[in-house]
Image (cartoon, rainbow, N blue to C red):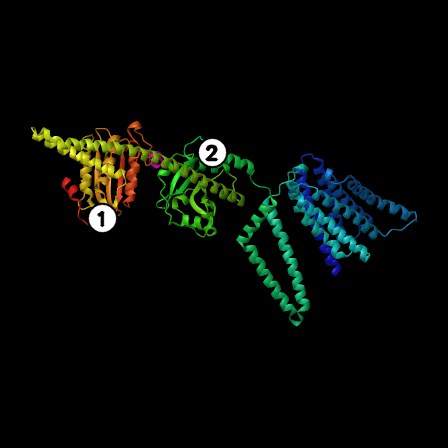
Amino acid sequence: MYANSLSTFGVLSYSLAALSFLVLTGLMLVSWRGRRRGMGLIIASAMMVVWSSLLAYQNARGTIPIVLIYLAEVLQDTAWIAALVGIAGATASRFLKVTAIIICVLACLVAPVSLILETLGVMYFDPTLLLSRSQLASSLAGLILIEQIYRNSTHSGRETIKYFAIGVGAIFAYDLFLFSQAELLRGLTFETWNARGLLVTFAVPLIALSSQRTPDWSLDVFVSRQVVFYSTTFLVVGAYLLVMALGGYYVREFGGAWGGVGQVVFFAGAAIALAALLASGSLRRYAAVFLSKHFYRNKYDYRIEWLRFIQTLSSTEERDVRRTAVRAIAQIFSSPGGMLFLREEDRGDFVPAAAWPMGPEVLASISNIAAQEDLPKFLARTKWIIDLKELRASPDNYANVAVPQWLLDAAELRIVAPLLQLEEVVGFICLYEPPPPFELTYEDRDLLKTVGRHVATHIAQDDASRKLSESRQFEAYNRLTAFMMHDLKNSVAQLKLIVENSARHKRNPDFIDDAISTIGNAAERMSRLIEQLRGANEAERMQIVDLAALAHEAAKRCQGREPQPSVHAEAGVNVSANPERLTSVVEHIIRNAQDATDGSGTIRVEVAITADGAHLAVKDSGAGMDTDFLRDRLFRPFDSTKGSKGMGIGAYQVREYVRQLGGRVEVQSSPGQGTTFSVILPTAVSSVASPALAAAK
C-alpha cells in the first residue's frame, strides 16, 4: 500500500515536471531570436521533458531498464552543463569548462562501455552506484559553473541572472544531495527520488523569468502576470494541503483515543482558514502587486519618460505653467487630456485652474470643491491615487469616499491624482481615460505620485517667482510714489501760496470766493493722498458708512463721462470703512465700466443686503472679458490693457482693500455680454452713517 502511494506520487510529481518544462520549451521556441545561448536553453528544457516523462512512466509501469534511466539522467545533466558553458563565455576559466565537458562525455560513455565489459565477462558494474557517481560529478561541475557565472557577472547582470542561478542551481543541488545519500546508504530512497519532480517544477518559473530579463540569450519570453499569479496560488495551496495532510497524520498518530476526532477538527479548521485566505480580496491584491514588483520588468522606460516629462514641463510653447503641467502628466499615460485643481491661498478651496487640451471655457462650468468636502479630506489623509472606474464599481475599496457628482457622471474621466508638496495636498489632477487596453497598476500609481510631487513643486516655484517679480515691481512703485510725494508737496505749497495772496484780488468777490474754495478743496485732497502714500494709520480713519450714500457720491464724481451711471440702492446698508478710500474703490469700478462701454450702453449701480452681507454691484453692458483674462490677468498688478495710460494696479488695489475690510470681490463676465463687478462687505453694527456722505446723497 505504501509503495503504491509512493508510485502514484512519483507519477504526479514527474508528470507535473514534464508538463511545466513542455510549456517552457514551447514559450522559448516561439520567442527564440536565433542566439546560440538561447538554443542551448531550449535543448536543456526539452531534455527535461523527455527525462521527467520517462521517470513518470517508470513510476507508472516499473518496467524500464536501469540503463535507459541512466542515459536520461546523464543526457539532461549534459544538456544543462552545455547551456551553462555557453552562458559562461569568458566569465569562467577554460579549464573549468573543458573539465565539465569531459565529465559529461565520460558519463555518457560509461553506460555502453560497462555493458560491453559485462557482456564479455570482464567486469560487473552496480548500475545504481554507477549512476550515483556519474551524477555526483555532473552535479558538482554544474554548481561550480553556476557559481562562476554569478560571481563574475556585473551588478546589473546578477540582477537578471539570479533567478536562473537559483532554479538550475536547485536542480543540481538536489541531485548532489540525492546521490550523496545513495552513496551513503548504498541505494536510492523512493521518497527523495520521487520528490525530484516537484522540485524541478518549482525551478520552471525562475528559469522563465531570467530568460525574459536577459536579452543576450535572445529569448523574449512572455509569461502573463495572471498565469504566474494563478500558478503561484496553485502551488501555495498545494503546499498548504500537503502540510495540512502531514499535520492531520501526526494528530491521528499521537492523539491517542482522541486522535480521530482531533484529525477531523484539525482538517475542518485548516479548511476554513484556507477558504478565508482565498476569499480575501486584499490578500490577492497584495500578492499580485508583490509578483509584479519583484518578478517583472518595469512597465515604463523611466529614463525616456522622465526626460520627456521634464522637456514638456520646461517648454515655452504655452505661457500657462499649469496647463503645461497637465499636458506633461497626461502624455506619460497617453491620456487625451486632463484638468488641474489648485488650492486657493485665502479660503483653501480647490478651484479649477487649468485644462488641456481644452480651453478655459471648459472650466467655467465646473464649480469649486470646498476644502471641507470629502474628496480633499480623503486625498490629504491617504495620499492615494483614485481610479474612478474602480471607485464606481467598488466604492468600498476607497472607504466610500464621496466625490462630486459631476466627477462620477463623467465616464471619460479615469484618474484623480493628488499633488503633494511637503506631504500637503496643494491640488489634484483629473486625467481622461487612456487608450485601451489600460489597467491602472501599482507602477502607474507610483509614477503618478512622483510626477505629482514634481508638478506641485514646479507650480509653487512659478508662483514664488511671480510674487517675487511683483514685489520688485512694488519696490519700483514705492520709489515712484516718493517722487510723487515730493511733487505733490510742491504743488500743495504753491496752491496755499495762491490762497494766501488772494487778498490782492478782492475786487471780484465771486471769482475770488470760488477760486479759494476750489483751490482749498484740491489742497485738502492732495494732502490726503500724501497721507495715504506715507502709510497713515487706516484704523484711525474707519467710520460707519452708508453704502447707498457712498454709491451716489461715487456716481456723482463720474457724471462727466458717458454712459452716466444710475444708482438703485436700498436704504440702511451700512459698512465700516474709510469713506474716502471706499468711495475711490467704487469710483474706480464705475470708471472701468465706462471704459469698457460705449456711449449707447448702460451702467447700473445696485446696493442691497444679501445673506452674505452688504452687496454693491456695478453692472455694465460693455465688451466683457473672457474666462482666461478673469482668472489670470484682471487682478494681476502692473498688467494693464490701457497701454501707457494705465499702471495696472487699480483692480488689484480694489480687491486688496476689500479683503482688508473682511469682504471679497466677485466678477462675472462674458465677451460681448457685459460685466458684473460685485463687492461683498460685512455689514456694520451701527446704523449711524457718515454725515458727509449722507449730505452728498
**Quadrant showing the N terminus:** bottom right
Which residue is rendered at x = 33% and y = 32% of the image? Answer: 639
How crowded pointer 2 is (Cα within 10 Å; few <14, some 14-19, many 20+) is rated as some
**Quadrant showing the C terminus:** top left
For badge 1, the amino acid type reads: Ala
Q: Is the stretch drawn in magenta largely helix, strand or loop?
A: helix
Residue 618 visible in the displayed image: no
Q: Which mark is residue 418?
A: none
The residue carrying mark 2 is 314
As drawn, 148 above or below 523: below
Look at the image and say whether residue 584 sits in the magenta stretch.
no
How crowded pointer 1 is (Cα within 10 Å; few <14, some 14-19, many 20+) is rated as some
Judged from the image, the secondary structure of the residue bearing numbered disc 2 is loop
The span shown in magenta is 628-633
Residue 547 visible in the displayed image: yes
Q: Residue furthest right?
A: 121
User: Viewer-proximal residue, 119 or 208?
Assistant: 208
Judged from the image, the secondary structure of the residue bearing numbered disc 1 is loop
Q: Position of residue 468 (x, y in %)?
A: 39, 37
Q: Between marks 1 and 2, how big is the CA–CA gap?
A: 50 Å
Q: Position of residue 353 (x, y in %)?
A: 39, 39
The residue carrying mark 1 is 684
User: Viewer-proximal residue, 432 or 565?
Assistant: 565
Q: Residue furthest bottom?
A: 257
